[in-house]
Amino acid sequence: MRKIELVDLKTQYTKIQPEVDKAIQEVIDSTSFINGEAVKILKTNLSSYLGNCHIVPCANGTDALQISMMTLGLNPGDEVITPAFTFAATAEVIALLDLIPTFVDVDEKTFNIDPQKIKEAITPRTKAILPVHLFGQSAQMEPILKMATESNLLIIEDVAQAISTKYFFADGSEKYCGTIGNMGTTSFFPSKNLGCYGDGGAIITKDATLAEKAQTIANHGQSKRYYHDIIGVNSRLDSLQAAILNVKLKYLDEYNAARQKAASAYDDRLKELDGLRIPYRDPRSTHVFHQYTLTTTNGSRDALKEELDRNNIPTKIYYPIPLHLQKAYNLAGYRKGDIPISEKLCDSVISLPMHTELDEEQIDYICSTIVKFYKK
Ligand SMILES: *Cc1c(COP(=O)(O)O)cnc(C)c1O
């Protein structure tokens, strides 16, 4: 059996090596390392993939969040509602810009922000809602849109784990995550579903004016070279990374299908174990399985992790500490017990190896080890 990796980028690269190597060499030959042709092509390709929107590439997913919040004109003291159970980047940027993160709880089944909890958290100072489409599945965008309209709030979607996920509206229409709110932000970190070979990110928006402003902010606030109209940042996606992404975007649907196939195979073997809950499939969303995350229901998480470690099966805890209990972002004085479902999930979730190159033998070995653990 091949060694089991949490994420296997090496095998994936081997399969597309000639194309990737050629794309990289072309950039080197052009010496157009910054803002080269490959970056322009990525903007066009990703825009048409997502159904005609504006793409502003930048240096990473965290910068994409920061530039979006700067673009939307949020001011110090404004409150931004965001989930407590997610990666830290959202809270970090909110706090960095002197905004106030208002953390709310998530739905235990979907892991995504709970619309009812958003409603309860809105105050006169609330300016924006920042849902994160966690693990590859969309947050409940229809009720979130409705609340945003009613309370005049902006929506920034964090799509770092859900690029190419579709959300289904009640009327049967569908949209890609990232194109539903005012702005979407994504990351091309190597292990993401669409990942490059270094750091990268992008801002997504249907609004041409916002796109132009975001582009200006990402480029030192320059409307034209050496004319600085607003305070910006320096955040670029380099041409080499864009060239790699142009190759990998062609395979994105295929890659997602491989992840979904692995997830279904896990589901089949793990669905009936006492003490373990397989990932919920939300009928309002597709699932691109950035992570395959199990929930233990009988306090067995840490023992399960140790057993898998002993059998050379890598796993990860996404995430061990909810954001409201992180020292750096706890500006509102939250205490343990304030956001109970997020806290409980941090103690009970475990993510299995998930990538495009898992084979049947590996999945069988992983599942057999888990089944044996629970049937002991
Ligand atoms: C990866 C990730 C980010 C940050 O992306 P970087 O490119 O590493 O800055 C932000 N939000 C979520 C949910 C992520 O998973």
Image (spheres, grey):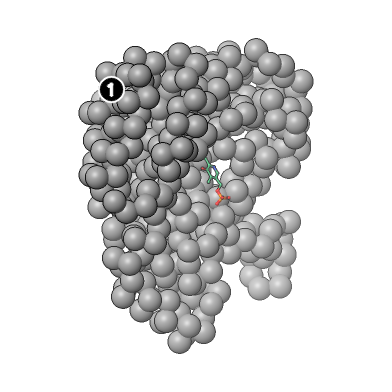
**As displayed, is residue 33 above or below residue 327?**
below
Amino acid on which the number 1 mark rests in the picture: Lys
Near mark 1 (Cα within 10 A), the count class, few <14, some 14-19 or many ≥20, is few
Quadrant in the picture for the C terminus = top left
Q: Which of 7 and 30 lies nearest the eye of the viewer?
A: 7
Q: Which of 41 and 241 lies nearest the eye of the viewer?
A: 241
Q: Which of 6 and 187 lies nearest the eye of the viewer?
A: 6
The reply, left or right, for residue 208 in relation to residue 83 is left
**As displayed, is residue 296 above or below residue 52?**
above
Q: Residue at x 68, y 58 (%)?
A: 233
Q: Position of residue 371 (x, y in %)?
A: 31, 26
Outermost residue to the bottom: 29
Ligand 1 contact, mark 1 (Cβ < 8 Å): no
Q: What residue did someone put label 1 on? A: 271
The reply, left or right, for residue 140 in relation to residue 123 is left
For residue 339, which quarter of the picture? top right
Tell me, yes or no, if residue 299 can be seen here.
Answer: yes
Q: Which of 21 and 59 lies nearest the eye of the viewer?
A: 21
